[in-house]
Amino acid sequence: MIDRRRWLDRFVEVFARQMAQRTSRRSVLTRFGSFLVGATLPVLPVARAAEDGRLPPPDDAALKGDAGDPKSCNYWRHCAIDGFLCACCGGSQNACPPGTEMSPVTWIGTCRHPGDGKDYIISYNDCCGQSLCLRCRCTRTEGEKPLYFTSKNNDLLWCFGTKSRAVNCSVAVVLGVATRS
Amino acid sequence: MIRAVAVVLVAAGIATAADVSGPALDYTLNCQGCHRADGSGTPGSVPALAGSVGKFLRVRGGREYVARVPGVAQAPLDDAATAGVLNWILERFGRDDLPADFSPYTAAEIGGLRRSPLTDVERVRRELLEAIARAR
């Protein structure tokens, strides 16, 4: 048993010395960091929301004022949002706050991006599992329909298919570009 | 460093957002919120379309039922667009289950059926599912 431990010690020592001679600490950290980011992104809520792989391309950085601020009711994606903005609640416009779960059932509309003038398909998913966030309350109704059109009404709480029905906040995920032929 | 950034961008899937138009856009805006992009639905809340919707057309009364369910009959789309998105749904989520003699819905057919809404959706659905099970 002792001999086996010594053999293992020698192996680890030789391996560590060779690695130290061939690589710098910075390069190891860079590669390890890239691996971690690459491995983590696919499990983020935004990746689950965009089940078909479409992700947002519009350049918000070019927008001036509230239209480019995810913490504002006037943010361009929020043209039909009704609820508390997850960007103010520990999440973002794409991701739920830690400890909450994004509802797979959602309501979907379009908002025009003020930069490129395109109509983007926006999914307003509720984040569920904690009580109301109570920060950044917004009510905008572009394209919303009365309550009897339940699938196009944003007054409803949309925590379906989640462990908890308690609503915390809402995200606005871009699914694609709507083009009318 | 550039390679590391490229790895991150590829992992994030940052690319041009896909254009969506025609029946696919109508599905996204009017159906997908509940039935989901892959038609899987949400057990207990929303029926699945994938692997299910096409089977209704194999039993008597099923074709009429599919065009009269609330989501179809009350869709904020005209008859032609509703027929288009329903045919798109059947092609995408029910192709393997459709009967050999299936013919696409027409605007006129949708127009007639949606004006005769179901008064007891659950009962009709249950009876049709029993007929589908017997027909296996």
Image (cartoon, coloured by chain):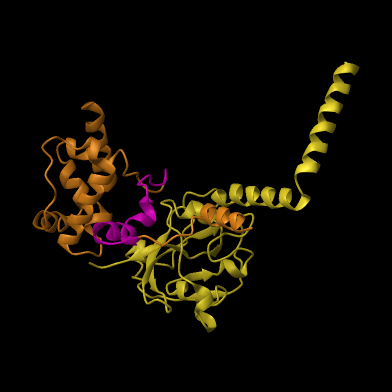
Chain colours: A yellow, B orange
Identified at 54% across, 75% down, the residue is A61
- Return the residue found at the far right: A2
Q: Quadrant of the C terminus of chain B?
A: top left
Residue visible at 19% across and 38% down in the picture: B98
**Percent x, y of residue B110:** 14, 55
In the rendered image, the quadrant that contains the N terminus of chain B is bottom right
**Quadrant of the rendered image containing residue B2:** bottom right
Q: In the figure, B125 relative to A158: above or below?
A: above
Q: Position of residue A94 (x, y in %)?
A: 53, 62
Quarter-of-image position of residue A86: bottom right
Per the image, is B23 magenta?
yes
- Specify the farthest residue to the bottom: A65
Name which residue lies at 42% across and 57% down. A54
Q: Quadrant of residue B107?
A: bottom left
Image spot of residue B61 (x, y percent)? 15, 41
Q: Relative to residue A109, is residue A106 depicted above or below?
A: above
* Residue sitting nearer the eye, A44 or A139: A44
Q: Position of residue A144 (x, y in %)?
A: 36, 71
Of residue B102 and residue B119, the one placed in the foreground of this image is B102
Q: Viewed as shown, does residue B83 lie left or right of B46?
A: left
In the picture provided, is B34 more to the left or to the right than B26? Answer: right
Asked if B129 appears above or below A152 in the picture, the reply is above
Q: Nearer the viewer, residue B62 or A43?
A: A43
Q: Is residue A42 magenta?
A: no
In the depicted view, which residue is nearer to us: B61 or B110?
A: B110
What residue span does the magenta drawing correspond to? Answer: B19-44
Q: Residue at x 37, y 51 (%)?
A: B37
Left/right placement of residue A126 relative to residue B105 reads right
Asked if residue A73 shows in the view, the reply is: no
Whether residue A69 is visible, yes or no, is yes
